[in-house]
Image (spheres, rainbow, N blue to C red):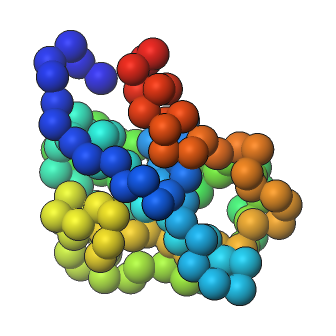
Amino acid sequence: MDEEDIEFTIAHNRRYSNAHLWFQDVKDERVMIGISEYLLADAGAVLRVNLPDQGQEIGEGDVLFSLRTEYEALRFMCPFSLKVTEVNGELESTPETINDSPYDNGWVLIIEPHADADDALLEADEYIEFLHEA
């Protein structure tokens, strides 16, 4: 991130990874994933999203999904093993939805974690503290 001040919001009803992904419990042990507005404020407009296949198994440390912004290409690594249960296919034709609505319509995936994901994630207040230290 550059040294300029950037404006962003944090959704407090979610958990976060140190890679700036948010995680929100939905139902039946499933978790919705999206990108933190903090990262988007610095990365610029999202131009393209590469999503995994629905039903795909992804291991910890493997690429979860990637995207291209006006400034850089980003690859998001999987913080724990999981199964992809749903992808937001609308992002392939309208990737700007991620910038326009990062905590709502701009969600990326819905997953089923294979193990307890809590140890790999930060509560909103912990994420804010992480951002201040970065």
Asked if residue 40 can be seen in this view, the reply is no
Residue at screen point 31% across, 82% down = 90
Within the image, what quadrant is residue 74 found in? top left
Residue 93 drawn above or below residue 124 = below
Residue at the spot 22% in from the left edge and 42% down from the top edge = 8
Task: Please identify the quarter of the rendering in which residue 120 is found.
Answer: top right
Give the vertical position of 69 relative to 72 (above or below): below
| For residue 133, above or below residue 13 | above
Left or right: 57, with 108 as reference point:
right
Please tell me which residue lies in front, 65 or 15. Answer: 15
Where residue 83 sits: x, y (%)? Answer: 72, 73
Asked if residue 130 lies left or right of residue 29, the reply is: left
Relative to residue 90, is residue 33 drawn left or right? right
Q: Quadrant of the N terminus?
A: top left
Nearer to the camera, 52 or 44: 44
Q: Residue at x 21, y 13 (%)?
A: 3
